[in-house]
Amino acid sequence: MNRTYTDNPDHDYGPTRTQQRKDALAVLALAVQLLELPPSKLARLELPEDVEREIANTRRITAHIARKRQLAFLAKVMRRHDASVFDGVRAALGENRDRQRQETAAMHRLEATRDRLLSDPDNAMSDVIAQYPNVDRQHLRSLVRQAKIEKDGNKPPRAYREIYQLLKDLAAGNRTDEAADEDADDLPEENED
């Protein structure tokens, strides 16, 4: 009688070939992410020595096919380790990606505010003043006027960049003020006897 592996439901046959392939491709994708990290960030991650060595070897290779082959070998070295070894690395990479998305979104909001200041200065100025009450209004108005002159005169956008930097500084100051307020709220109140 011929028996197939599905005849015994109690036996654990391990992951399917499809699952093995998905796992291998996930490790390969992690290897690519590690290669793209700058050395300073890579040094902060806790990686096994052999993986660090293979990352360094892969970075030295510039020929396309040889680099692809070395990348596959790096993934193979990574698969030799237990998957839990790279849990911290995956978490760190995920946090970096989320933080990077937040920073990019904040940058786009500042750029949109700057563009509104140039296209509709009256309404945008009142919004900026409402959001950042400690802004130097006169300085901001002069920067907006200067940016318009530079744009019309086909000059380098110095004031345009300064507006962005001013908004960025105001936003950073706002975040530190909010953090200080939260810290002050966490402090216990003094009892007056």
Image (cartoon, grey):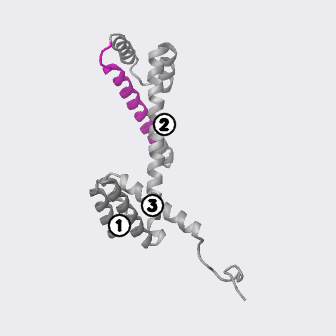
Prevailing SS of the magenta stretch: helix
Q: Is residue 54 visible?
A: yes
Residue at image mark 1: 51
Marks 2 and 1, the one that precedes in the sequence: 1
Residue closer to the observer: 98 or 72: 72
C-alpha gap between disc 1 and disc 3: 13 Å
Q: Magenta stretch? A: 154-180
Of tags 3 and 2, the one toward the viewer is 3
Up-down: is 127 above or below 6?
Answer: above
- Please give the name of the residue rendered at 44% of the width and 37% of the height, measured from the top-left corner: 177
Residue 193 visible from this viewpoint = no
Distance from the alpha carbon under mark 3 to that under mark 2: 29 Å
Number of disc labels = 3
Q: Between residue 85 and residue 52, name the one nearer to us.
A: 52
Q: Callout 2 environment at 10 Å: few (<14), some (14 to 19), or many (20+)?
A: few
Q: Residues within 10 Å of mark 1 (few under 14, many from 20)?
A: some
Task: Kindly identify the amino acid type of the residue bearing the numbered disc 1.
Answer: Val
- Which circle marks residue 105 in the picture? 2
Where is residue 140 shown, x and y percent of the image? Answer: 39, 18
| Residue under numbered circle 3 | 28
